[in-house]
Image (cartoon, rainbow, N blue to C red):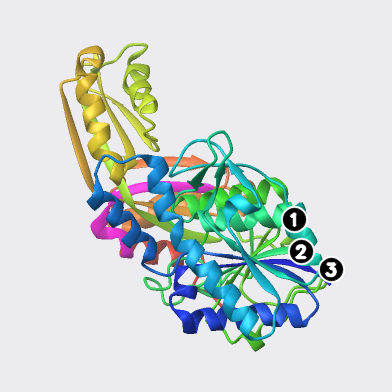
Amino acid sequence: MAVVVMKFGGTSVANVDRIRNVARHVKREVDAGNQVAVVVSAMSGTTNQLVAWVREASLLHDAREYDAVVASGEQVTAGLLAIVLQAIGIPARSWQGWQIPILTNQAHGAARIAGIDGARLRARMGEGEVAVVTGFQGIEPERQRIATLGRGGSDTSAVAIAIAVGADVCDIYTDVDGVYTTDPRIVPKARRLPRVSYEEMLEMASLGSKVLQTRSVELAMVNRMRTRVLSSFADPGAIPPVRSGSNWPDIGTIVCDEDEIVENQVVSGIAYAKDEAKVTIRRVADKPGVAARIFGPLADASINVDMIVQNLSADGGHTDMTFTVQAAELPRALEVLRKAKESVGYFDVESSDDVVKISVIGVGMRSHAGVAASMFKALAEKNINILAITTSEIKVSVLIDSAYTELAVRTLHSVYGLDRE
């Protein structure tokens, strides 16, 4: 017997027929004798509609009431799935985040989970009842208000619940059958990765891969919760049920410890992020403290800065500073810089959201030199200009003009041998 947490995203529960398909996946695990909790998202498009209604009601709205509205989508899905499971003879009940409870901080709309008491869930699951849990939400205990975890937060809910109930695995069912070396829509030869390390998946999630939410991967990595990415549209009978301690079949992608991967590729994947914007501050005085006066106000406004490039201007006394922010944050970033112009003392600010960040990722980069050099050479041969560079132990990212996105991804996928079977 195994303890399994299964999470199904919006496209997997888009209508009642698809919810019935989800129920068949759940039945497979129940019939195998496993204890099961299911975490569900809102039906596809529902959250967007709820958010639109809130904004139509008032552009300046109470974040607590926003959460009360948008959390209702998952409640509908959880209730419907519980009903469908009961109809096919499986004991089930729906659980809202506050009933478990999933405790959060006070950051409504983007709350973080502070703790989960899994005792009630474990007891009911031990009695053979399937727990159907609303994803994306919990309760802020001080004011007893519903709080949502931000878009994609159902992944985080699932991993947190898996940890709380001591699950053997957290299965994330989505509309793809695993994590690929890059976007198959751009590179038809992209391959599914049977296993990927937590560190690689974290980089992929933060650098444009939409398969898993970043915070869910962080949580899984810290708690060493094995997580699988599977397709909800696969035949439920074609996926073997989870067996505690058994060998894992070559289905989907397992996100796990690096030492569970027999042979690490030097490069595991190519990611790209189109939601980037570039800001260049012209003729800033080249003296101590200037960077703090630029980036301090941005940090105070909760605007995350990624790539930073500083160049010495021709006169030697001034510098140009270039950095990137999320495209959605560009208007706010420009407003912050406008207000800080007197203290910073710059000449002009230029910006563009017509850029893309391309990243090469792989834990094997730790022990192999020349990965970055190969990347730069390959892009140069295609006449692709690099606007900014950032690196970590297992990734190299460059900023380029968005017009070259597909060319860059295809080129790098081939350069690092990811096209090979």
Horizontal side, residue 283 vs residue 3: left or right:
left
Task: State the image coordinates of residue 94 (x, y, percent, origin top left).
Answer: 61, 65
- Residue at screen point 39% across, 45% down: 65
For label 3, the SS is loop
Q: Give the range drawn in magenta.
A: 395-406
Q: Where is residue 353 in the image (x, y as percent from the top left)?
A: 23, 47
Residue kind at label 1, given as amino acid type? Arg
Q: Per the image, is 397 magenta?
A: yes
Residue named by callout 3: 245
Expressed as whole percent of the image width and height from the top left, the position of residue 122 reads 77, 59
Q: Which of marks 1 and 3 is nearer the N terminus?
A: 1
Q: Which residue is drawn at 67% across and 55% down?
A: 161
Q: How far apart are marks 1 and 3 (CA)?
A: 25 Å
Identified by mark 3, the residue type is Gly
Please identify the quarter of the rendering in which residue 133 is found: bottom right
The span from disc 1 to disc 2 (Cα, nearest Å) is 6 Å
Q: In which quarter of the image is residue 335?
A: top left
Q: In this view, does 147 lie above or below 167?
A: above
Describe the element under mark 2 as helix, strand or loop: helix
The residue located at (65%, 68%) in the rendering is 93
- Residue wearing tag 2: 124
User: Which of 341/61 is in front?
Assistant: 61
Mark sitting on residue 120:
1
Left or right side of 145 for 316:
left
Element at label 1: helix
Q: Is residue 372 visible?
A: yes
At 75% from the left edge and 61% from the top edge, which residue is drawn? 167
Depth check, front residue: 104 or 253: 104
Q: Which of marks 3 and 2 is in front?
A: 2
Judge depth for marks 1 and 3 and give the one in front. 1
Give above or below for 304 relative to 252. above
